Image (tube, rainbow, N blue to C red):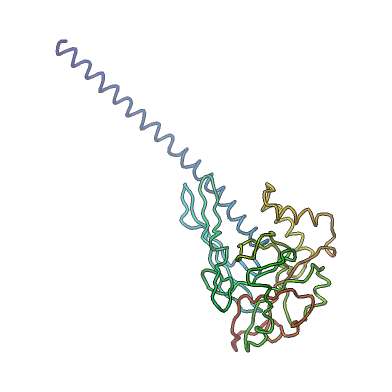
Amino acid sequence: MDSSLKGALKKAKRKQLLKIIITSIVVVLILLPVVYKTGNYFAAKNSTRLHEQLFLHNEIAQPNIQINSQVTSNSSMFGGNIITNRSKNINGYLVQWSTLTSSYDWIRIMIDHNELIPGFYRSDTGSYEYDKQTKNKVATFYHPSIKEYYDGIQNELSEVSQMENYVAEVGISFDQPYTLQEIQAKIPDNLNIVWLYMTSPIVDESKGPAGVQVYGFDPSDSPKEAYNSFIGALKNYDAYGNNETIQELINLNKNKQFDEVKISGVMLTGQTQNFKALENEDFIRGASVGATARIVPYIKPEK
């Protein structure tokens, strides 16, 4: 093959290579905005979905826990994090609660369940559940259908009522379900009913806490409206009907008027000495203290 033919072949190859390079650059330049726009679309969609799921979860399954702020962090076209700052209102005293760091990408949303599930401390003198970040004690609710718990059914009313100059929250579990009207007649006026315990999964709790989710809602100023919102939130949270406990709760109450709905327990807040009136009451199966705060002169308790 003579040198002129070789030169022509090399020149043709260079032209072809240059064409490929130019074509590739053009394709990349066209695809980059498409990929960027598509990535942002799916990331934004799952960011919105995660925000909604976090708010719904707090509404249906977080006893006396408020979301103070919820913001997107480290967001990009590939995903990001959502930071949820939370607290408890203990009779007018705000107590810090664990901060959630949940994440999302194009395909999935991942709620920070590690921080949602309480830690468990056990020693020779007893055991209790606690919030992993703040280390505050978490109140335990006792399901009426579960007969045996790992540390028995605790009633800590006498202990909490002896605390001087404190406010506290106490989870009260009933001997049987009651209507809200029946409950309000039993609870002293100087205590706040801040959360209604409806149900939780029925599991074996005899070996240790199973870390199951409790479900209920804040009755607020209008319990009937709060209940309707709770049922709506349950349906939205479990839109695909995969959560057996939620679906059982919905089906159990779908044909009932609110004044017929039965409640298995309440979260109460108040000054510690006001809990003394509930000691030795037959309708109380168990009473578990949660977060507490010392009373200071410059913050007046709500009750």
Quarter holding the N terminus? top left
Residue 281 placement, left or right of 61: right
Residue 90 coordinates in the image, percent (x, y): 64, 77
Residue toward you, 19 or 83: 83
State the residue lying farthest toward the left: 3
In the picture, residue 206 is in which quadrant? bottom right
Residue 129 percent coordinates (x, y): 58, 70
Q: Is 145 situated above or below 30?
A: below
**The quarter of the displayed image where residue 124 is located:** bottom right
Query: As drawn, is 278 to the left or to the right of 205?
Result: right
Q: What percent of the width, then of the height, locates residue 228?
A: 77, 59
Residue at the (68%, 85%) spot, across then down = 161
Decide: is 5 above or below 101.
above
Displayed quadrant of residue 216: bottom right
Residue drawn at x 29%, y 25% is: 17
- Quadrant in the picture for the C terminus: bottom right
94 or 168, which lies in front? Answer: 168
